[in-house]
Amino acid sequence: MLVLGIESSCDETGVALYDSEAGLLAHRLHTQIAMHSEYGGVVPELASRDHIRRVLPLTENCLAQAGKQLSDIDAIAYTAGPGLAGALLVGASVANAMAFALGKPTIAVHHLEGHLLSPCLADPAPEFPFVALLVSGGHTQLMAVHGIGQYELLGETVDDAAGEAFDKSAKLLGLGYPGGPALSKLADTGDVNRFTLPRPMLHTPNLDMSFSGLKTAVLNLVTQQSPLDDTTRADICAAFQAAIVEVLLKKSLKALKQTGMKRLVIAGGVGANRQLRSALNDAAKKRGFSVFYPPLELCTDNGAMIAYAGAQRLSEQQSAGSFAVKPRWDLASLNCA
Ligand code: KG4
Ligand code: ZN
């Protein structure tokens, strides 16, 4: 079965071809970062218009890379939510129009299910069940994943997502948008012991997290240390990264203990963070659990995870002809009976 996947929930247009026997055949991505950086964040209307410009050329490019024709496609998967309504509608409309013309089914994919299953595109892939730490720009959740469509929410952020805290703190430090990768790069050159920032909700008995106070603490530090020199900026980055990594690590360990599971999967953009990976790898070695990541280029938004999730869902849910997008969509609502 050959599945075309289309991702357009935010500021990346991703297209991919996944074959249920041969694996990932091709994936193409266009990021709108340069376009939005002028405004310091995503401008939804510009995002939608750019998805329209990119999605068909990227699809042609993918087909050419895989040596396939449109007529070879068996189904088209697209991100139906959560995300920006206008941006989602571009992928949904293109997928449904193409599917209608080809007489093939469409599969409406949950963006977070795409992230959650993206480590299955790596080698080795995790077996079920596993604990998943989903850390993207919009979500921070710990889930127990018992199988495809069997997702149990264990805990989540009560305010900002981890990626959002990275981005907002980076903005306070004058590092542009999206600041996560830039903040992380600078943090690697800073002195982690000069400042100590709070670890919100680290010791609460549940698996919920909170990151908005950490961002406020960065704001206070920036105000107190202004004007910032390069060394101070790097030291604040190091303190911020250490705080967020410790919270994510400790809560993940608590989730493994609580569920008795031995596999941990990291998904979403913040999963690309080197310090987080190294802390998790060390803990895994010490405590005897396994940790899995998506291939680095598939940590942030992409079409490959949507094509893959679509292929897993192919036999269960297919439709053609009518569609709706869900800008807000609870992942646990996907659960099979
Ligand atoms: O999963 P994703 O592409 O988008 C959403 O679905 O939200 O994640 C994007 C987020 C952004 O907040 C970005 O700053 C963050 O992931 N990010 C990172 C790194 N690379 C991306 N945060 C920390 N360190 C990184 N290396
Ligand atoms: Zn995402």
Image: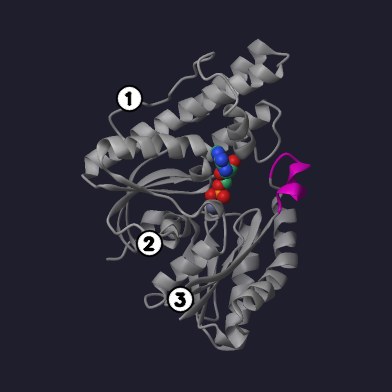
Question: Picture coordinates of residue 227 (x, y %)?
Answer: 73, 14
Q: Quadrant of ligand 1?
A: top right
Crowd rating for badge 2 (residues with CA inside 10 Å; few <14, some 14–19, many 20+) = some
Q: Secondary structure at mark 2?
A: helix
How far, Cα to Cα, is label 2 from label 1? 31 Å
In the picture, the quarter occupied by the C terminus is bottom left
> Is 38 covered by the magenta stretch?
yes
Q: Quadrant of residue 151?
A: bottom left
Q: Amino acid at mark 1?
A: His
Viewer-side residue, 322 vs 196: 196
Relative height, residue 107 to residue 195 (above, below): below
Asked whether disc 3 touches disc 1, contact meaning CB atoms under 8 Å apart, the reply is no
Q: Secondary structure at mark 1?
A: loop
Question: Picture coordinates of residue 254 (x, y %)?
Answer: 28, 35
Residue on which disc 2 sits: 334
Task: Name the residue: 62% across, 61% down.
Answer: 8
> Which badge, 2 or 3, is on the more N-terminal residue?
3
Viewer-side residue, 154 vs 190: 190
User: From which residue to which does the magenta span run?
Assistant: 32-41
Task: Name the residue: 59% across, 21% down.
Answer: 236
Relative height, residue 286 to residue 3 (above, below): above
Asked whether disc 2 touches disc 3, contact meaning CB atoms under 8 Å apart, the reply is no
Give the label on residue 132, or none.
none
Crowd rating for badge 1 (residues with CA inside 10 Å; few <14, some 14–19, many 20+) = few
> Which badge, 3 or 1, is on the more N-terminal residue?
3
Residue on which disc 1 sits: 203
Q: Does the numbered disc 1 mark a residue whose Cβ is under 8 Å from ligand 1?
A: no
> Which badge, 2 or 1, is on the more N-terminal residue?
1
Give the label on residue 22, or none.
3
Q: Amino acid at mark 3?
A: Ala
How far, Cα to Cα, is label 3 from label 1? 45 Å
Q: Quadrant of residue 180?
A: top right
